[in-house]
Image: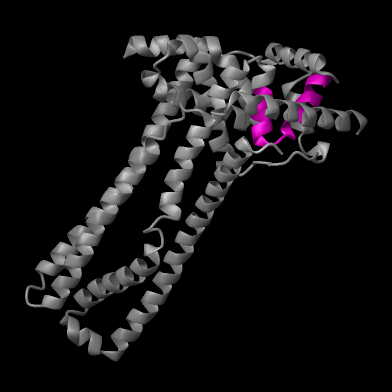
Amino acid sequence: MDNIEIESIWKKVDSKISPKSTEELQELLALKIKKTVSKFYYTLCIDITVCIGLIIFLIITALNRPDDNIYQVNNSILCLITILSLSISLSSLIKLQNNKYNLSLSDWLGVRIKLLSSWLLGKYSKLYIVLIPILLIMINLSIHVYYEHKPFVEVLKNEESVYGLIVGFIIGLFVSYFAINKIRKYQINNLEFLKELNSALYNVR
Amino acid sequence: MESLKDEFLDILSNYQGILHKVSLIYFRNQADREDNFQEITYQLWKSYPSLQNKDSIGSWIYAVSINTSISKLKKNSKIEYRDNLPDLADSIDTIEKISETENIQILLQAIYNLSVINKTLMLLYLEEKSYDEIAEILGMTKSNVGTRINRAKEILKQNLKHLNHG
């Protein structure tokens, strides 16, 4: 098959396409906007609700333990980390939502690669390895100490409580790492694919 | 806002062929194509207010359509990054539904077997876009576009030859 033949076959593709009416397009667009906006707000709501719920819990429990200084410090640090996480996750969500496709392919690939690289391979990308165990210990302690109705130090001296905390910590750690690794693996594959495309744009193979 | 929307829908209505053809070359399955068409429509609407040069609407639509489709390809994990031929049987059912003409089926099959970049280049070439426009849409140099298109055409012809003899 020569070029002219290929081009003439391609021209026939137009006749096989059934165009949508303006009303159909309008309906399709309205439906997509509704779906995307709902998904965005749904994610946003879950994110905010979980974080605010945790902050309220930490504040109330800390207020109920005015004499336990270590418990208050533990909850205050957790509160700060939660607020920080909430603001980072909100800004990431908004960045994702504002992803623009009206760039040339190479520019668009560049923007996506930069964004994903900073999330996955950036300076703070491995911080979760340290942060998650610390957070898990602190959250476990905050909940456990509160419902034991004993001071912080006393709970830590109790052998049974410590075993319980260790088991809770190991399970929590396993679940968290498993979930994060799954997400990271998916995103790293995405990043590799984009990098591959970017280099394929410039390399004649 | 309403007039902007009407203006956008008018443009979309006139240029929807691009969306259909972009979806056609990247997705073998009709449901995926429909889904992609909807996603492109939404992305075009999102970036429409920032469209500066209304003289190059075609290029803008191609750029958004190609970028959106590529991002969706990965999400759907249905990307086949290869220039070698797979078994014809894995896609023939859906192709039959798209086209009644055997030649179109064979051409589409040959395009499906191209790598993503070659597929994109062939689409723009077959749509009779100039090298300047292709360079603008893909962000490549004009000379690179020429070289890449020639290479893509060779691979496409090899694929077609393979299919015709297969």
**Image position of B10 with respect to A167: above or below:** above
Is residue A29 or residue B157 the one in the foreground?
B157
Residue B2 in view here: yes
Q: Residue at x 82, y 40 (%)?
A: B87
Q: Is residue A6 left or right of residue B146?
A: right
Is residue A163 or residue B129 the one in the foreground?
B129
**Image position of A60 with respect to B57: above or below:** below
Q: Is residue B106 magenta?
A: yes
Residue A92: image location, x then y, percent? 35, 45
Residue A87: image location, x then y, percent? 26, 49
Residue B144: image location, x then y, percent? 64, 29
Q: Is residue B166 magenta?
A: no
Question: Could you tell me what secondary structure mostly forms the magenta stretch?
Answer: helix
User: Magenta segment, which residues?
Assistant: B102-123
Q: Is residue B67 left or right of residue B94?
A: left
Total number of numbered labels?
Answer: 0
